[in-house]
Amino acid sequence: MGKNLAQKILSEHLVSGEMIPGKEIGIRIDQTLTQDATGTMAYLQFEATGIPQVKTDLSVSYVDHNTLQTGFENADDHRYLQTVAAKHGVYFSRPGNGISHQVHVERFGIPGKTLLGSDSHTPTGGGIGMIAIGAGGLDVAVAMGGGAFYTPMPKILNIKLTGKLQPWVSAKDVILEVLRRLSVKGGVGRIIEYTGEGIKSLTVPERAIITNMGAELGATTSLFPSDEITLEFFKAQKREQDWVELLPDVDATYDEEIEINLNELEPMAAKPHMPDNVDTIKNIGPITVNQVAIGSCTNGSYMDLMRVASILKGKQVHPDVSLVVAPGSKQVFEMIAANGALADLIKAGARILEAACGPCIGMGQSPQTDAVSVRTFNRNFEGRSGTKSAQIYLASPEIAAAAALTGKLIDPRELGEYPIVTIPPEFIIDDSMVLAPAEDSSTVEVRRGPNIKPVPINEAMPETIAAPVVLKVDDNITTDHIMPAGAKILPLRSNIPAISEYVYCQVDETYPKRAKEAGKSFIVGGHNYGQGSSREHAALAPMYLGVKAVITKSFARIHKANLVNFGIVPFTFKNEADYDSIDQDDKLEIPNIREQMAKGTDVTVKNVTKGTEFTVEYDLSERQISILLEGGQLNYTKKQAES
Ligand code: SF4
């Protein structure tokens, strides 16, 4: 029986387990990436392992999230990241060089390799045929030290693309259609592999848009084959030597299959406040738009910005619209500057930002109160823009450009002829903003500012947990709800005592204080708890506040793994109806939790306040249970090293 592409790459990297969906596998990691918002903690954790040099083929530290320097914190952290990278064998992509995922695809990614990144949009690398997975910083630190990455073996979902995209319909509409059909939970426990005639008309940047937003489906990763189109991209990047052809076998089989006819797709948008709240632009209607933001790791490529520049050329941005444009990388920035497209954007009235995440992570350009903001980004969670009342629509660069010109969310086909944009045969290659690690690490002093505090270490799991439910929340809680980002909070990412003051602050600002007063506590949640990013602070800061277990109807993959890494037990209700029987502030007790979990049996929880009992379960490997018993991955790794 033939293998699909995901199976081929995984089997080459398998170090433990069997590739049976749901069973834990361990895979060897070839490359890692970090971004600054998660990277400081990842490198602090790597330092804590005591391993002198990274053991991967390639590790890159990017600075793209916290580029606003409104205080000393970010600048200090950039200096820490630069020096710690130099010391331990990591390449350092300086602030201004671009967004990690965009730069990694352009300059470092290699088809058929595995990439683990401390950012949930790491699957962007699937656009060039990598198995690229987002994970918590601690998992990445372990991988940098040569450790395997463990994950339940995903099912492989084949999305067969037929037909060809019509003018004004773009790759963004493809992934929005997938989100419309499958929802933000539809990719959980799956690798999405794209095949079919339709992929032959999609360039690498277009494929990367689709794999990037596979993260919004909750997928482990998404990938395209590495074919002649990939080769063209590698040639343009002067990296032909890194290209290899990688295709699924002709008789490959898949666990699941769906088909999308590209001919039939229409311009679409994800409405507030979820990426799967998708409808056609026609159905949404011509609502008034106040802000347009173009860029991000999803749509900050050369082709994206060239398309926007062509649409805006010789015209003016609507007087009631603020248009901001952030190129995805320095390469893109330099190229649109060199060919005059940047001048077209500036002349039309665009406000040009640096090549970084910027408004996507709430780092500036928050919209006005109650604004409608059309963004080419990948997430529209409430409040992520920095303005809670803002209504964020996710759409293609074509739709965004049309909105910038007209002040309305209109079908871009109303603009007339579709501008033809071609990929140049050669990109501008200039890696001067990437610093190689030091040849002699003994000469490097790691510089730490006052904002960098030691990593807090959890205690081992106690015999009994008796604690109140300090917070009860609904379905679809995101990591932005748990640990908000933004210009005020992100600079505290390497200072857990300080950042923990903001846990759940947008849901209930009294939460951090109440959790601290309780000492130990539970959180109760609904379905898809922890969806969104790989932000391990959404587990680490609650751990610091004393959260011992989170009991939900279901978890998002990366957050569940992060909870385990920091010694917080991710329980799910055996009977979902028990969720309704618990109120906030109820006192729960789990006697003999160590014994029950060591045996791997379901766990009985007493609701002391209500005088009732209910059962919880945990879908965890033996390795994960051992980590939880030790109080987290750091304790577990140290113990393993000692034994
Ligand atoms: Fe940066 Fe936004 Fe992409 Fe995250 S999703 S890496 S914040 S551009």
Image (cartoon, rainbow, N blue to C red):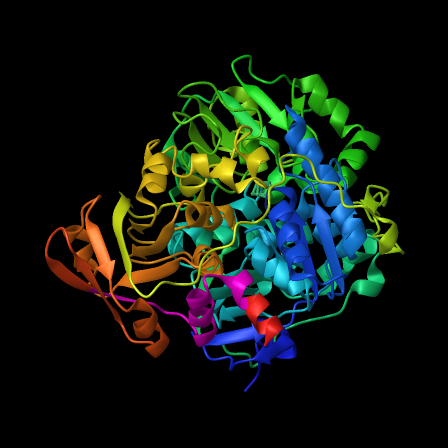
User: Which of the 4 quarters of the picture holds residue 22?
Assistant: bottom left
Is residue 143 something that shows in the picture?
yes
The quarter of the rendered structure image containing the C terminus is bottom right
Q: Is residue 292 above or below residue 217?
A: above
Could you say which is closer to the camera, residue 591 or residue 80?
591
How many numbered discs? 0
Report the front residue among 504 and 373: 504
Quadrant where the N terminus sits is bottom right
The residue under the point 34% across, 41% down is 515
537 relative to 192, above or below? above
Q: Position of residue 450 (x, y in %)?
A: 65, 34
Res 330 quadrant in image: top right
Magenta run includes residue 429 = no
Which residue: 64% across, 23% down?
A: 70
Ligand 1 occupies quarter: top right
Where does the image place residue 268, in percent across and percent down from the top left?
46, 40
Q: Position of residue 29 (x, y in %)?
A: 66, 67
User: Is residue 130 visible from the viewing direction of this image?
Assistant: no
Q: Position of residue 231 (x, y in %)?
A: 77, 61
Q: From what the image shows, is residue 463 above or below residue 450?
A: below
The part of the chain drawn in magenta is 615-636
User: Which residue lies at the image location 50% right of the left edge and 68% below the top edge?
Assistant: 151
Left or right relative to 15: residue 539? left
